[in-house]
Image (cartoon, helix red, strand yellow):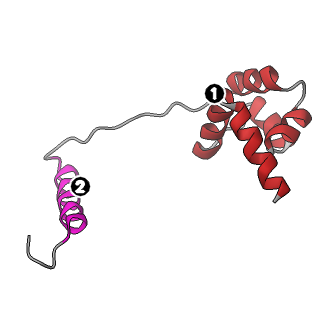
């Protein structure tokens, strides 16, 4: 490293070399497959926390029609899947965040 080089710059160059080697088939990079959230799981999460999609909307800010669509099998994108998983694990945090944003 010269005086002008930074650790970030060196790390970035190393990462790009790793990407190039991967693209050439010279190295394998670790991967993670994220399962999509099923309609059954969405419905179970919603039912465990709210009697209806409307109540779920009031608590978590996700439109009732959107939740209904997910419960009927419309695919969730990655962000929606993460949000639902977060609601499943820590509903009080999501609910408090939604309430705080509404008050602001």
* Quarter of the image that includes the N terminus: bottom left
Label 2 belongs to which residue? 19
Report which residue position mark 1 lands on. Answer: 89
Q: Is residue 98 visible to us here?
A: yes
Residue ID at (73%, 46%): 97
Horizontal side of 23 relative to 91 (left or right) equals left
Ranked by sequence position, the earlier of labels 1 and 2 is 2
Asked if 9 appears above or below 103 in the picture, the reply is below
Magenta: main secondary structure equals helix
- Where residue 20 sits, quadrant-wise, is bottom left
Q: Position of residue 19 (x, y in %)?
A: 23, 55
Mark 1 or 2: in front is 1
Q: Nearer the viewer, residue 83 or 20?
A: 83
Is residue 22 found inside the magenta-colored segment of the image? Answer: yes
Q: Residue furthest left?
A: 2
Identify the residue shown where x is 67% and y is 27%: 88
Q: 49 or 22: nearer the eye?
A: 49
Q: Is residue 19 magenta?
A: yes
Total marks shown come to 2
For residue 52, the mark is none
In what element is the residue under mark 2? helix
Spatial distance from mark 1 to mark 2, Cα to Cα? 35 Å
1 displayed left or right of 95: left
Estimate how packed mark 1 is, as few (under 14), some (14 to 19) or many (20 or more) residues with alpha carbons within 10 Å: few
Extreme-bottom residue of the structure: 4
Dot 1 and dot 2 residues touching (CB under 8 Å): no
Q: Which residue is nearer to you in this view: 81 or 76?
A: 81
Write down the region rendered in magenta: 6-25
């Amino acid at each position: 490293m010269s005086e002008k080089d930074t650790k970030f710059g060196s790390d970035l160059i190393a990462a790009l070399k790793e990407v190039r080697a991967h693209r050439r088939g010279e190295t394998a990079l670790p991967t993670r497959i994220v399962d999509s959230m099923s309609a059954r799981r969405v419905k179970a999460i919603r039912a465990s926390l709210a009697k209806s999609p409307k109540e779920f909307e009031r608590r978590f800010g996700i439109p009732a029609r959107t939740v209904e669509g997910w419960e009927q099998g419309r695919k969730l994108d990655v962000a929606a899947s993460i949000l639902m998983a977060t609601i499943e694990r820590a509903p009080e945090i999501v609910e408090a965040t939604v309430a705080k944003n509404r008050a602001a």
